[in-house]
Image (spheres, rainbow, N blue to C red):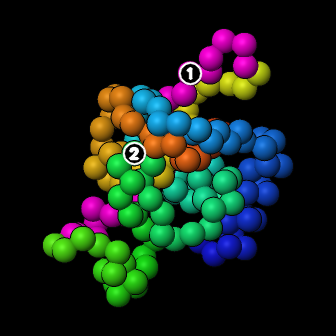
Amino acid sequence: MTASELESYRQTIVREFDEPLILNAEKDVTLLNAGNTGNRDAYGGKSWINYWRAITRNQDSILYCSSCEKVIFVGNLAQDQVRKYLPIGGKIEDHQAHGGHLWVIAPKGVTWQGGRYIAPLCPACNAKHNQHILIKAGSKLCKEVGAKVTEE
């Protein structure tokens, strides 16, 4: 999605659901990578990684996995753009950015809600469903709102 498409998508979400909460990991934290999320579609039929990019206003196409910090890519970047970031022998499909669903539990006494939050993950980290994974300091997580849930 282009910068203007991401901003338009963000504005639509904000009109419908108010401003989704963004959490900044101030230190490394272990969170549960939610399972059974294959039946959850981001609002408006967009990808979860584009949902994250729109809400956080991070329009970069080259990101880092919030867990292992591997370089990940959004969309179909040109092969020559991607290859300069890949390790020797690395496969492009192992670096495709996913919007991973993480369970965040709000500590007692805070005013914000816990629940499902989205963060950029590589395919390997995103595949660790129902497992606790490390989320690195500096990662941004945005609250999931407006998901379309279908019966599996």
Q: Which residues are magenta?
A: 90-110
Q: Residue at x 36, y 34 (%)?
A: 133
Residue on which the image places disc 2: 67
Q: Is residue 73 above or below residue 49?
A: below
Relative image position of residue 5 (x, y in whole percent): 69, 70
Q: Is residue 30 left or right of residue 21?
A: left
Residue 105 got which mark? Answer: 1
Mark 1: secondary structure:
loop
Q: Residue at x 40, y 83 (%)?
A: 81
**In the structure shown, which secondary structural element does the residue marked by tag 2 occupy?**
loop
- Give x and y (percent) for residue 101: 47, 39
Q: Give the residue drawn at x 52%, y 52%.
A: 48
Q: Does residue 25 belong to the magenta stretch?
A: no
Q: How many numbered circles does the render carry?
A: 2
Mark 2 surroundings within 10 Å by alpha-carbon count, few (fewer than 14), some (14 through 19), many (20 or more): many
In front: mark 2 or mark 1?
2
Where residue 131 sits: x, y (%)? 32, 29
* Residue at the extreme front: 27
Q: Quadrant of the C terminus?
A: top left
Q: On the image, which quarter does residue 1 sit in?
A: bottom right
The answer, for residue 147, to whether it is visible in the render is no
Looking at numbered disc 2 in the image, what kind of residue is underneath it? Ser
Front residue (pair 111, 137): 137
Residue at horizontal 57 percent and vertical 60 percent from the top: 50
Instruction: Left or right? Give the position of 129 relative to 44.
Output: left
Q: Amino acid at mark 1?
A: Ile
The numbered mark, 2 or 1, whose residue comes first in the sequence reads 2
- The answer to whether residue 137 of the structure is visible from this angle is yes
Depth check, front residue: 137 or 36 = 137
- Residue lying at the far bottom in this picture: please name it: 80
Mark 1 residue crowding within 10 angstroms, few (<14) / some (14–19) / many (20+): few
